Amino acid sequence: MRLKKGHDPRTAFEAAHSFTKKELCVPLVQWISDFLSRRGLQEPDGRPLFAYKTSSEEFETLRQLLHGLNLGQHAHPEYAQAWLLFAAEWWKREYPGGAWRWGPLCEAAGQRKVAHEKTRSLVIDGRRQWRLQTTIKSEGKRFIGLVAVNGGLPMRLVESAQGGLSRLLRMVTEQALEYRLQDEHLRQAIEAQAELLPACYQQAPVYELLDSLVKAVLHIRKAYALQGAQDPIARLQEECPHWEELFPIALDSQAAASLIKGLVRDTVSITPQSRRPPFQIQRGLRFSSDGSIPVYELSFVMQAQARRDQVAEALGMAVDALPPHFQLLLRIGEREYLVGEALLRDEEYQLIARPLPAIHSLHNAAQLIVSRWGATLHIANLPGGEALSHDEPLIFENTYPFARLLAQGDALVKGESALAAMPARTIVYAEEGEARELHDCLADGQMLMELPAGTTRLTYKQQPFVVTISASATRHPEAYWHGNSLEALSVPGLLFRGTPRLRIEQGTGFSSYAPAHELFVRTQGKELPLAQARAPGLCRLIWRKDGQRLLNTRAVLLPDEASITYAPGATTLEGSIRLHHWPDVPVRCESEQIALERRHDGTGLTLRLKSTGSRPATTVPLCLQWPDGEQKLTLPFPGYGVTLLRNDTPLKLNQALTIEELIGCRAVLMSTQGAENWQIRLTSGGTDSRSTLSQEIRYTGIREIRLFELIPAIQQMMSCHPGLDHTVQLELIHAHQTHARLQVGRYSTRIRLHSQKEMASLSDGARDLLPEQPQAEGLILALPLAEPEHDPVSLPLHFSEQVFTGNWLVSLPTDAVGPWLLYTPDDSKLHSRPTVVPPTVRQLSKPLTPLRDALCEADGEERMRLLRAALRAMAADPEAEDWQTLELLLDRLHHLPLASLDICQALIREPQALAMATLRLDDFSSRLAERLPCELPFEWLLIAPEHWFDTFATLRQQLAADNPRLLSLIRTDIQSKSQFLSRWQPALRFIFDQGLHHSFDLQSPDVGFFLKNPAMLTASWQSHLFDGEHSAMQQMFRRNPAETHQYPGSGNTDIGAFLKTPHGQMLLRCSKLPANDFKLATVMLPFMAAFDTYAGRGQQWQADPARLFSLRDARQFDTVWFDSAYQLGLAMAQAASMQK
């Protein structure tokens, strides 16, 4: 080809190359054009990408089309458009959860090793092509977030977490209606219940989608007035045919449709400001989309927050008996599940849900256990928790995919039909219409039938039942029995001393007790009023109203004075159980390895027991033969000493465990008659006697301690020390004698390097482990610390003669700089200490940012110095490139113990950088706010207010100085992040309010008043804390009576010196406590910490393990008092500085 003179050959080449690209990208251009035309569009209309409802066939065709393009064609404008649509659909369809990596997405789109800059430009260009309204944030997961928001909720999350996800959405929606939550509080409420989601989906893009979903359902509820609609979905379809498009999820799968429609139905039924019980058991039938046999399902429903008096009333406890912090366990049959935690904030409990595994049985009784320090305080019966009989029909509403249990036996159902599960030989007679069999054999052998409108009579074993179905029927309210329960594992589960009462939850949200004339007892073939029954033993409690039986529950009623005591024998193999004021009924032991002798002396039963098995017995399974049937009663074996169990498997009395291995562990305690006081002593050794920490927890009259509930206390002690290998010793002590010990550490194994660091193995300290080859595959990963965007590498296994040797080859790529971290993945059951291997690249090909450079440093002390310097520079520049590196690093490694990550050790030593990370990075506060104080010698309360104020000011000046729209977005984002942290640390709320007031123009009445009249506000708060018998201090004393609670001491703090300061003397006068009062340290320590923190001396507390532990011990003792006092102390210190 000849060129004319003066013609630039590059121009001709580029023109030809551009022409070639256009020719070859015609299929892509045509595909997008066809995609839009099938939706009646000529060009994109700005809707989110999930709203285009891409079909599975379109998604696969697009995948093949992208795979067929070569690298040169990726610059075509339509490529970014097609790629972003594919990315959004991939997120929805195939994203498996976990730390986000672009690699799997790019690989699915036919790309290999795409640089971050390339994905960034693809997102930006694709957004422009689709005319998306979604903002690309100026910080955090900016580009990932845009893909996620346009993809909608990941289907794998919807399918794998149906129960947990629907629980979270229901809790947050209720909370939003009850408390009229605004935007930032709504996101905060979602993050607070995030544990209900699988761990791999607990991240900012998912929270943002759930936030949009809740807002959509709240909008529907408000806009279309669906309250009272018998079929809200049908009404919605008439009022707003395109209502499904309001949700960030396409309802093109059965799982998605059932989730959203179920949420709409639930939300319509919520009555704001009502007094619904905070806790409920839900039972029902779950149908699958493939037509297979439905399964029973039991779940636990809890509000996200509730007033203190509501919680006490629902649990059947006195308000003063509720501690400020307790755990909730659900007992179903003989199994117990941790389902929640309660934290008192002002006069309301924040209720944090914990995930409950799928429960596919309905008939066992379900009870709620209130527990503190692992010991049972109270057992409560709940609506829907009564035991069900296998001989009576179960009546369900006829809804898909979840049919709620309405009643057992007789039932009055509102609707056009109902479902009934009943024994196979039940006689069914429908007076109107025809009953239809749906399944002839459910999991428990019962048959499932659809009953028509009208009256259907069911008869089984000559017992008649009547089910009436009518569109005008009034549904009866929930009811459950309240009474004085005996702490014992019993079947039936209702085991009362004295006469119980029936609590009725009215549909209007109010509760009452059933009148006496509606309550009856059936025993020995006779029925009599409950008020006339005198401890009938095993019986049926019946509620009958207007001639219809509404409740028929098996229970055991004993005299008011009935109790159970234990008398251990001379050895762990023998002892006695005394059933005081129990009638003379036959008793047998169902274990062949326990010999039983019974004797009744007129006042009660004495059971003499002897264990004859090779192992000492831990429980006694008894069967009591009452005139009306059998009662199963499981009691602790009365041998002297301690039995340690993990998931019912005995542990050695001096065993080493990791914190995670404590889950499922409990201690069964027995002691001699009249000496039931046990204690647990936690001890953590230090470098000298001053840094050795110790804590004692007393138990009175307790037979079992759930050791896993002590995990927070163990973590709190362990993390006072900066080292990685500290352990805590747990001792069980009675009568000054230690009966059992456990050593609790962070790791059960460590990754050991050998053979000139060319091999790695897993060691438990005594020997190398030899896992099975399938378990060893992918068990050790490697990540270049200075390049966290690099995909983790799985170490290959080492073989000898084709047999796995138990070693891994440390064979690493040479395409990354800096040292590599070897660690186990987040789904591994092995808790292994990670290790670092030297760099594979000796010379750097390009200059590194300060943070990456610090991560490359081999010397530990120098690395820490460089990390802290890098973080200080980052704190002054919120747009520094290193923020992205930090976010990627924490995304990859946040599942590891934070003490093992130098970057976290550096962060807690640089409070300004930590404050910036908290307010700037997505997922940081929700993922690490709780963990940092649990795993490191650090407390949020020890960050000086000036660090927060400076951070707020820096963010305003550098990110949103002159852009009102951006200012609004950043203000909302920062509000959400700061309020999540203040949920766990309420004393910080006033600091954050001031920062938002000063730097982001967010007005706060308290802040405005404080700035004008600081002395008046502090005087008001001070009066609330100290004045009168109802003061916060006096309430704290009543919550923690000295007879049963050991008040923490001052530890390694010089509280005396603080009390000699002017502020200390004034506070001492306000408290009216003598200077030698044993409660004084608990009262004054939060004030001392607040004044030191305001003065910038917080690091002195963190650097001294004993001093830090004293602070934590005081806060753990009573968080309500500590947080209120600390907040006042900070305000007093600030007011004093303002007056200078």
Image (spheres, grey):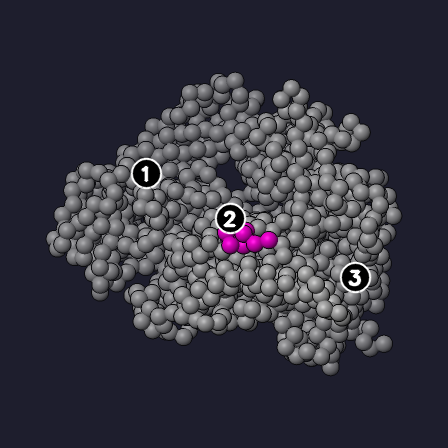
Instruction: Using the image as rendered, state which of residue 867 and residue 664 is in the foreground.
Output: 867
Is 166 positioned to the left or the right of 284 in the image?
A: right
Q: Earlier in the sequence, mark 2 or mark 1?
A: 2
* Magenta residues, start to end: 63-70
Q: Quadrant of the N terminus?
A: bottom right
Asked if the residue under mark 2 is in contact with the one under mark 3, i.e. CB atoms within 8 Å, the reply is no
Q: From the top left corner, tell me how far across and down residue 468 is, in percent.
A: 19, 56
Instruction: Using the image as rendered, state which of residue 753 and residue 606 is in the foreground.
Output: 753
Q: From the top left corner, tell me how far across and down residue 1099 is, in percent.
A: 82, 56
Q: Nearer the viewer, mark 3 or mark 2?
A: 3
* In the depicted structure, whether residue 172 falls above or below residue 1105: below
Q: CA distance from mark 3 to mark 2?
A: 37 Å
Q: Neighbour class for label 3 at 10 Å: few (<14), some, many (≥20)?
A: many
Instruction: Using the image as rendered, state which of residue 1139 and residue 1063 is in the foreground.
Output: 1139
What residue is at 34 percent from the left and 28 percent from the top? 586
Is 418 positioned to the left or the right of 296 in the image?
A: left
The numbered dot on residue 874 is 3
Q: CA distance from mark 3 to mark 1?
A: 59 Å
What residue is at 54 percent from the left and 29 percent from the top? 649
The numbered dot on residue 355 is 2
What residue is at 46 percent from the left and 24 percent from the top? 608
Q: Neighbour class for label 2 at 10 Å: few (<14), some, many (≥20)?
A: many
Q: Secondary structure at mark 2?
A: loop
Q: Amino acid at mark 2?
A: Pro
